[in-house]
Amino acid sequence: MNESQFDCAIVGGGLAGLCLAIQLADKGREVILLEKEEYPFHKVCGEYISNESYSFLERIGLPLTTMNLPDITEVKISSPNGKSLTRKLDTGGFGISRYTLDALLFELAKKKGVVVWQNAQVNEVVSDGDSFVLRTGRKEYRAKIVCGAYGKRSLLDRKAGRHLPGAIPGALNYLAVKYHVKLDFPPNRIELHNFKGGYCGISKVDGDKCCLCYLTNAEILRENGNTIKLMEQNVLMQNPHLKAYFSEAVFLNERPLTISQITFGKKSPVEQGMLMIGDSAGTVTPLCGNGMSMAMRASFIASNLIDGYLDGRITFAQLTFLYKKEWHNSFSSRIRTGSLIQPLFGKKILTNMAIGLFRAIPWAADKVISATHGQPF
């Protein structure tokens, strides 16, 4: 095989990209994965994975049962004034840091024969009719199929004009902030605490630490002098639960990990002939119900269809049509649920009303929570 010619090229080495690469390698396909960072590295992420993905991860080679990971079985939600509701998670989930998980998947992908180029920025992807050419600063690669798994935004998105900040009329611009902390916190619980303009998730991960990650309207940061610490003191800590956690926690990072200019407008699962998986497919708000499991499920869908195309069982047109169809069938209901819930979070009056309603009618809360979790695949 020419080292620059592959069956499939994957741009981005997060969960979606790594899982897709591993599955295609298991099917005997020649795969290259290009990641602009170097493993291991941290990512802004809530680090709660619903159990719908548990058997999938074990099936592709991760020994989760031996890793002593937190088993998360309940959720606690609070409004900005501290009024809270705790409910059981029927599907449940587990906690693991992206630093750990992505590094394990990276090693597994290499072991299975995936060619992984780190520190590789893909500048352009073009089709010549029969295959795709990927151009980096160092080299060109050719592949029969290209998948975009590069996250919420990238150079390729900017070149294609896909959801640049301000490109969606009326869309809010968000900022996400993540810490790892030491905290006396129940290992079986994930908590979501609202504050003006956003919400914060806290749950245990591996290494006896907690992931504390929050999303806020970027305007709230500007109102606080573009200073994260000042915003946390003036806004987040108005919620008494968050005030206690920020006061008691031992922060393990000198500085938080952040990502800005996030929007949640609709994108397409197929763009210029590339299959988009994970956050690059767009529309996945944090409250859709675990974007990490959705990314892995999308990789599962894509791997089977790509294998069919490479075997000659389906045409390229059928590949893209079926991927769009299966993507929407798998995720459209969860996306609608997330889109309905998202506007409530961070709104003081609406969240107070919603928590009060769910406390009075707990089955309604259970129905919403259930709609954000999928079935095992």
Image: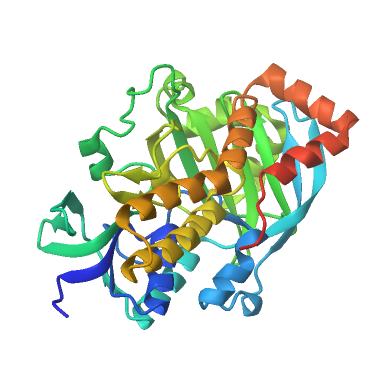
Q: Is residue 18 above or below residue 336?
A: below
Residue at image x 35%, y 64%? 309
Residue 285, how many percent across, how many down?
A: 53, 38
Q: Name the one closer to the observer, 87 or 317.
A: 317
Give 12 or 300, whichever is nearer the viewer: 300
137 vs 240, nearest the viewer: 137
Residue occupying the point 32% across, 57% down: 12
| Residue 252 appears in the figure | no
Q: Quadrant of the C terminus?
A: bottom right
Residue 141: percent from left, percent from top: 15, 64
Indicate the quadrant where residue 108 lies.
bottom left
As drawn, which residue projects farthest toward the right? 360
* 294 is higher (above) or lower (below) than 168: below
Residue sitting nearer the eye, 265 or 241: 265
Judged left or right of residue 180, residue 344 is: right
How many labels, in total? 0
Question: Residue at image x 87%, y 36%?
Answer: 362
Q: Is residue 43 left or right of residue 236?
A: left
- Placement of 338 over or under 88, stated as above or below: above
Q: Is residue 170 visible?
A: yes
For the point 61% across and 26% down, which residue is it? 346
Q: Is residue 243 left or right of residue 82?
A: left
Colour scheme of the picture: rainbow
Residue 103 at x, y percent in the picture: 42, 69
Asked if residue 336 lies left or right of residue 105, the reply is right
Q: Position of residue 336 (x, y in %)?
A: 60, 34
Which quadrant is the N terminus positioned in? bottom left
